[in-house]
Image (cartoon, grey):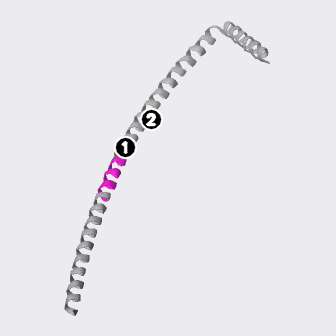
Amino acid sequence: MASTNASTSNASNKTTAKAEDKAHSKIDRAANAAHNSVDKAAEAAQSGQEKMHDVSQQISAQAHQMAEKAKQQSERVSEAVSSYTKEHPVKSVGIAFLAGAVAAGLLLRRH
């Protein structure tokens, strides 16, 4: 009877060992699949980050170009106004007076 118990125990140990091996194998496959998924997600995030960086660089360059154009146009207008005031000082004072009177009238109507 001891021989039967020993063979049953030995068979049970082999079955348990096979089940453990299968479980370990499935866990390893699941871990590898999860690791691969994390790697793919990290690559996608990196790619997205690089694209966002490129877009932000393009927007920044466009903003600088627009600011430079606005500065140049402002300088041209300032030069034109300066030139006009030098050529027509009396008209310039009159225009400034009228503009101030209109602004004062608008502000007084609001209150």
Prevailing secondary structure of the magenta residues: helix
26, 107: nearer the viewer: 26
* Mark identifier at residue 28: none
Picture quadrant where residue 4 is located: bottom left
Which residue was labeled with disc 1?
Answer: 48
- Name the foreground residue: 3 vs 94: 3
**Secondary structure beneath label 1:** helix
The amino acid type, in three-letter code, at marker 2 is: Ser
Q: Identify the residue at image location x=25%, y=67%.
A: 25
Give the x, y percent position of residue 105: 76, 12
Closer to viewer: mark 1 or mark 2: 1
Residue 68, percent across and down?
Answer: 48, 27
Q: Residue sitting at 27 percent across and 69 percent down? A: 24
Image quarter where the C terminus lies is top right
Is tag 1's residue or tag 2's residue first in the polypeptide sequence? 1
- The residues colored magenta run 35-46
Q: Is residue 86 above or below residue 38?
A: above
Circle 2 residue:
60
Residue 34 position in % (x across, y down): 32, 58
